Image: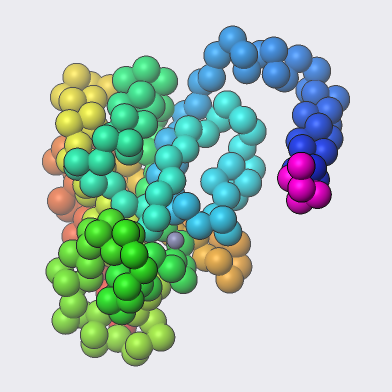
Amino acid sequence: MSVELQELLANNKQWAADTEAREPGFFSKLLKQQTPQYLWIGCADSRVPANDLVNLLPGELFVHRNVANVVVHSDLNCLSVMQFAVDALKVRHIIVVGHSGCGGVKAALLDTRTGLADNWLRHVQDVRNHHLDWLMSLPAQQRVDALCELNVLEQVRNACQTTIVQDAWARGQEVIVHGWVYGLHNGLLEDLKLTAGAADEVAPAFALALASIKQRYA
Ligand SMILES: [Zn+2]
């Protein structure tokens, strides 16, 4: 095995030993159940490691990541994760997390050809096209981060419109959907204040969050 991979396995042994030493019985407890309160839908970017950013242990955060944190109504992968999280694990919060300087968002903004992912990033281009006039009114260096934030809003709205979340709300199950953005430059998460816990909250919350983004970049 290559030296780099041996290092990973050695790191893992150390981590398991440290974790068990800090909290004896940690792994045997996890074996019996996981009861996360949160579903994190984030970007696959290696600089945005979900558990680390919010300092949560294994068992505390259910995670789905893809390029540019997109929630598409036909993506069975994301929908399956959401359904298990909401229906089986009963998570109370779904958090869509974008990040500044996202490579996927940048490629979508600038029409950069990347390969197969171009098709995936068409969803982000839809967001770009929808807000094109406003984006183009910004200085060029602000457009990527602005689109990262707009993309979070659109993906939060998509998450709210899934049958999974709609059905949970219809039966009175508490599920609150949030939109956050992570700053690569300072390591901080920011709440974009698009928070919805009922079907009729989505549109007004979206309008307020969008106005807030536009104000911030004005
Ligand atoms: Zn990204």
**Residue found at x 56% / y 56%:** 46
Q: Which residues are magenta?
A: 1-5
Color encoding of the figure: rainbow
Ligand 1 image-quadrant field? bottom left
Q: Quadrant of the N terminus?
A: top right
Q: Main secondary structure of the magenta part?
A: helix
Q: Is residue 203 visible?
A: yes
- Against 191, residue 186 (above or below) is below
Residue 40, image x and y in percent? 44, 41
**Residue found at x 31% / y 52%:** 70
**Residue found at x 18% / y 64%:** 126
**Residue found at x 63% / y 46%:** 52
Residue 59, image x and y in percent? 57, 26
Q: How many numbered discs, if any? A: 0
Residue located farthest toward the front when viewing the structure as drawn: 1
Residue 153, image x and y in percent? 28, 57
Q: Is residue 175 visible?
A: no
